Image (spheres, coloured by chain):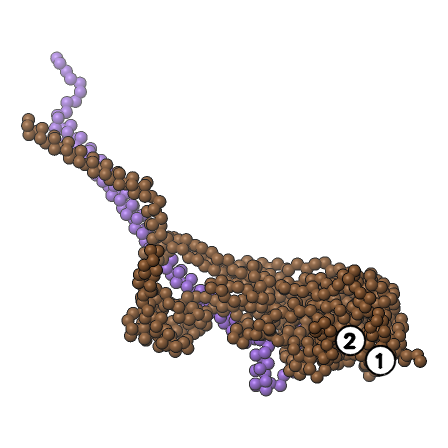
Amino acid sequence: MNLQAREIKSRKQVRRSAGRHSGGFGLLAIFHLLIMAAILFFIVNYRISLRDDISRLGREADHLKKELHRYDREMEHLKLKKENLCRWSYIRQKIVAYNLPLVYPEPGQVRVVVIDRKSRSAADIYNPSGKMMVTKR
Amino acid sequence: MIRNNTIATRIKLFAAFAFFLFMLVIARLYHVQVTRHDELFSRAKEQYTAVVKTQGKRGEIFDYNSNLLVGNIPCSTIIADPVETGDNEQCEKAAKILSAALGLPEKDIFKELTQKTRTKRLDDGTTREIPRRYAFIAKEIPLPESEKLQEKLRDEKIKGIYFQETTKRYYPKNELLANILGFTSIDRDKIVAVLGIEKSFNTVISPVKTEDVYERARDGAPLTLQSSPKGKDGINIYLTVREPIQAIMEEELDKFMEKWRPRAAYAIMAEPETGNILAIAQRPTFNPNSRDSMNADAWRSRITEDVFEPGSTMKPIAISGAIDAGVVSPNTLFDCESGHWFYGGKILRDSHPLGMLSVAGIIQKSSNIGTAKIALMMGEQRLYDTLRRFGFGQYTGIPMKPETRGQFRPLKRWDKLSITRFPIGQGISCSPVQLVRAYCALANGGNLVDLRLVDRIEHPETGMTMKYPAKKPIQVFKNPATHNKIIGMMKLVTREGGTATKAAVPGYEVAGKTGTSQKFIDGAYSQSKFFASFIGFVPADNPRFVLLVTADEPNDAHYGGTVGGPLFKAIAERTLKYMNIPPDNEIADADAKKSRKPSSNSEEHTRTTTVKTESRQKTGTSATTPRRTSSAPKNNYDGVYVPKKK
């Protein structure tokens, strides 16, 4: 008797099984590809949005810098104007114009206000109202 | 079979053609990328890169207490692009607005805006009309005005007018310290320092230009993130001058000019211990902000550039040398020959006839003959060494260019009369700063210090400050007692019987000396033109400042005591009040209180002290106890006036 130990599969059966296996792999690959594409899409979009944010912030910073520069110039102008108005010849002129009865102080009458930052905490203890300390020079 | 062959041939031909095309592309690529690389790369770079040139601001100048003396005021330069300004109607509208705001003729602005082309001469000699893209309208327009104008132009929708940001050197205190600060001028685009501190420190306070290259988008915005380019600012300078004291000095100097109408006048105040100049002023002066009213004669810094014969202000210096060498003592008597003395073939005169005088009296009465006799006792070598040690003929250390060294002949070129004339301030000339430096040494125990005008410099970005270096003082006296002796004698000058009672400051002891010198004109001493000076220090025993006041050709009077004395008093009195320096009698009272022992008769002691003080004040002397070392002798050198023996 001629006996065959192995299981006999028909050709059709073998083809079907192979086809089933390759279809699943393909789907998996497509799925991976899609995920990759989605990640890539997300990264690219995120990068674009970041770049957009950067350029927007850059523009804003540029605008603020210009504003700051304008304020700087204005402050510089005001500082010089203040110095011009602080000059003694101008003050004297105003004293005469308003007829202010001012006299020069005698030595000993002059007191100088000193705000000592280092001893501020100590000053607060003795001076809780927060008024400036007046010390005689 | 034939059909198959045809197709194969066609494919081969197509492949060959494609290969040929590919080779062409390769060749072109080679040409573009390799052969013309440099040219094309530079052209591309030019298109996408921009260069920004920026310049920092010029360093500022402050006084000792950080009050601004020189700054940079923001302003604008207005320019136009005639190509962009539009048609005549638009230009007319723009010209009207600009003319109203700037006060310029409308016709001129209109002409500038409507001139759309200009003629360019080419290399081959031919000419061509090209678009005119630049027209200058106005410069140095203050910030508020330029901002208003910009807004108005924007509202009226006028194009082609541009505002370039610039700064202008500005002196907020106007005339104050003008001759020392100096000023700058503009030569094309460059700032040129003309004189004063501006010139002397030009390299330090000049800003640094920087260039920044960046890649830009089509609209000009930078593509790469970067910190905005910024030029480096110049170093800030802090002077030793105190603005309030300077203001006092200049105010009093103005009053003085009105009263005496001199050709010129100057005053210098310096701290004797440090050599710091507290105030320095001269008249005539100028307002550096208003160039139209500037007079070139007023520019010069007379204080450092001019020389004058110091006259009698030289006497204490020469006599201090004689006392230091032990040749004379304050009580040594000299015959002043009733005001006329024949020596070396020439007559030497005193302003008033004087008889026998002590050395102290010679200083108090300012005797030329007495001083000449002291100098003869000293000898030429000692006199020369003394004057040299006090810094005559040398630079003072003040950082001002140019600075004169004065005229002080070397010993080998002295003639027979030199020894009698130099100690009375004739035949020798010095700058005002040299004289102040010498008196600083007299006031400061004989320590000769260099004068300092710049206290510190500051880095504008880091805020780090660096003290301007000071040289070690040189001791001019060999004998430590000399200082007290000479001060004791100089105090007599402002007391009753002295030549400068008008220079006395109530409540304070003043040590000083008058000086009246004839001007040397066309080889002879003028009989009508004088320098009248007074120099002194106060409080005499603990001097806070040395002050020199000088008038060049005053009218109505010419004596140093009469002309300079009141000015000295006015400036010194106000400055002492400003500096909060208590009067000498207050110090004496405080010292007396301190030394008072707690005893049963303490009330009695107080009463006695008060009475003593009052009695001294009545007799014109102060109750101040001079601060001297225990080893120093008592300085009781009242001028001894002895009539000449018959």
Query: The chain drawn purple is chain what?
Result: A
**Residue A111 appearing in the image:** no
Q: Which residue type carries mark 1?
A: Pro
- Name the colour assigned to chain B in the rendering: brown
Q: Quadrant of the C terminus of chain B?
A: bottom right
- Find disc 2 in the rendering and name its residue: B509
Instruction: Give the residue drawn at x 34%, y 53%.
Output: B47
Q: Earlier in the sequence, mark 2 or mark 1?
A: 1
- Dot 2: within a 10 Å radius of its alpha carbon, few (fewer than 14), some, or many (20 or more) residues? many
* Quadrant position of the N terminus of chain B in the picture: top left
Give x and y (percent) for residue A19: 16, 32
Amino acid on which the number 2 mark rests in the picture = Glu
For the point 58% across and 68% down, the residue is B182
Residue B405 in picture, x, y percent from top left: 69, 64
Label 1, secondary structure: give it: loop
**Are the residues under badges 2 and 1 in a single subunit?**
yes
| Residue B32 x %, y % | 29, 43
Q: Residues within 10 Å of mark 1 (few under 14, many from 20)?
A: some
Judging from the image, mark 2 belongs to the subunit labelled B
Foreground residue, B249 or A12? Answer: B249
- Residue designated by label 1: B353
What is the distance, in whole Å, between disc 2 and disc 1 at their CAs? 28 Å
